[in-house]
Each structure stands twice: as C-alpha cells, then as structure tokens.
Amino acid sequence: MSFGRKRSGGAMVAGGVIITVGAILLLNQLGVLPHVVTLHFWPVVLVVVGLIKLLSGSDAGDRVFGGCLIAAGIILQTNALGITHLSWSQAWPAIIIAVGIMMVAHALTGQPCGSKFSVAPEWDSFYVFGGGERQVTAKDFRGARLFAVFGGYQVDLTRADMEGTEAYVEANAVFGGGEIRVPTNWKVVVQGMGVFGGYDDKSQYVQPDPTAPSKTLYVRGVAVFGGIEVKN
C-alpha cells in the first residue's frame, strides 16, 4: 500500500478526541454529569494524548513518551480521586528516569533527540506541549505525517525532491499549528480542513522548465483551534 493511499489516521484520532471532549462538555452543560467530573477528570486529557503518541509514534522514543504521558495522567487522576497520594517530591525522580529512557530509545533507533534534518523518504513527527523544526533534503521524498497537540512544527521541503510525481503530507494540529515550506516548482493541493482554525495554501507555483514532469504535493489533515499554512 502506497503512502498516499494510507488511511488518514491522525485526522481520525483528532476527530475522535474532539467528539469525546465535545460530548463531555455538552453533557456537563445539560446537567447530566455532576460538576465534579470536569474538575476532577482533567488528567484524562494526558491519557488521551499519551494514547495518540503511543499509537502513532514513529520510534521507540515516541512510544516511551506516550507511555509516560499515560502513566502521568493515571497518577494525577488517582490523586484527584483520593486513591493515591503521590507528592511532587516523590514524582520528579521518575520524570528524570523517563527522560533518560527516551534518550536511550532514540539513540538505539539511530534518531538523535532534537534532530532538525531528515534525508528519509518517509517519516512521522509528533509534538505535544512543544514544537520543532525539520529541514528535509531527501531526493526521493514520498511523504510525512505531522501531528501537534498544544504545540507546533515547521517543515522545510525547499531543498527536497520527489521520488515520483506525487507526494503526500498529513498535517494535523489540535490547539497548535504548523508551517510547511515547499519548492516553487511543486504544485500544492490542499485537502485539509480547519475547525475553529485555518488550513491555508499561500504557495505559488512556477515551472521554469515546461518540458519537465509536473510534481504535486497533497497536503491533508485537520487543524482544530489552530492553523496549518503552506507557503514557499
């Protein structure tokens, strides 16, 4: 199955999260749920974000980070319900251990933490409560999946080239945003959707050689309470 034909999993996950949050807020406004639910069950958000990271992570480091978010959400939730009584002084050494595990996992997969460059034809990036930049120099670029939750990303494709005549980028953002820079000789077809946000194509297409094959980048996904921008 080619990259372009794969199911838009990030958008589906984001949509599922939005539906769940909206349903809870609606039930709360209708008085179906007790007021204590919205006050004491906010750590569930960390669990949801952790699940997204765990399921969509591209390497072991991403999956470890997702597991840490899930664990943190569970601990905070049980603390809020009075089941456990873990203090910050007891928790911070575990955070240091988790950071070390993520660094080791990234090292084992050959992907250094914080790397800004990519020569791979396909890759995934996930940002939560933070952001990152990536410069792509691959000459056989086929596609990428980008996801930001309470964060953002910048991807520079101006020095990249496609393997064929089409490439696909799945760009999603929830309470965040993203910027994708493309070469002027790439056509851009935006198939994304903004929900209380924007999904804009500000790129300009210029083909210096009329005899050269046309190359098209398809950008799809969803931006919720945020924005995705494609430009040169």
Image: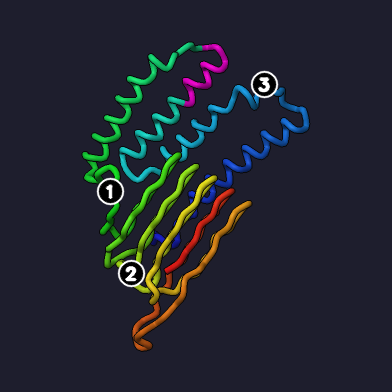
Q: As drawn, which residue projects farthest toward the bottom?
A: 211
Q: Earlier in the sequence, mark 1 or mark 2?
A: 1
From the top left corner, tell me how far across and down residue 57 is, in percent. Answer: 38, 43
What residue would you read off at disc 2? Answer: 162
Q: Quadrant of residue 89?
A: top left
> Between residues 55 and 89, which one lies in front from this camera angle?
89
**Element under label 2?**
loop
Quadrant in which the N terminus is drawn = bottom left
Quadrant in which the C terminus is drawn = bottom left
Badge 2 crowding class, 10 Å Cα cut-off, few under 14, some 14 to 19, many 20 or more, is some
Instruction: Check the image and report above or below for 15 versus 192.
Output: above
Q: Quadrant of residue 95?
A: top left
From the top left corner, tell me how far across and down residue 176 is, in percent. Answer: 51, 47
- Give the CA distance from mark 1 to mark 2: 22 Å
Residues in magenta? 73-83
Q: Report the side of 216 relative to 80 (left or right).
A: left
What residue would you read off at disc 1? Answer: 115
For the rendered model, the colour scheme is: rainbow
- Does the segment drawn in magenta span residue 79? yes
- Does the segment drawn in magenta span residue 136? no
- Magenta: main secondary structure equals helix
Q: Earlier in the sequence, mark 3 or mark 2?
A: 3
User: Nearer the viewer's eye, disc 1 or disc 2?
Assistant: 1
**Element under label 1?**
loop
> Between residues 103 and 163, which one lies in front from this camera angle?
103
What residue would you read off at disc 3? Answer: 36
**Residue drawn at 47 percent across, 20 percent down:** 75
Give the residue type at disc 2: Met
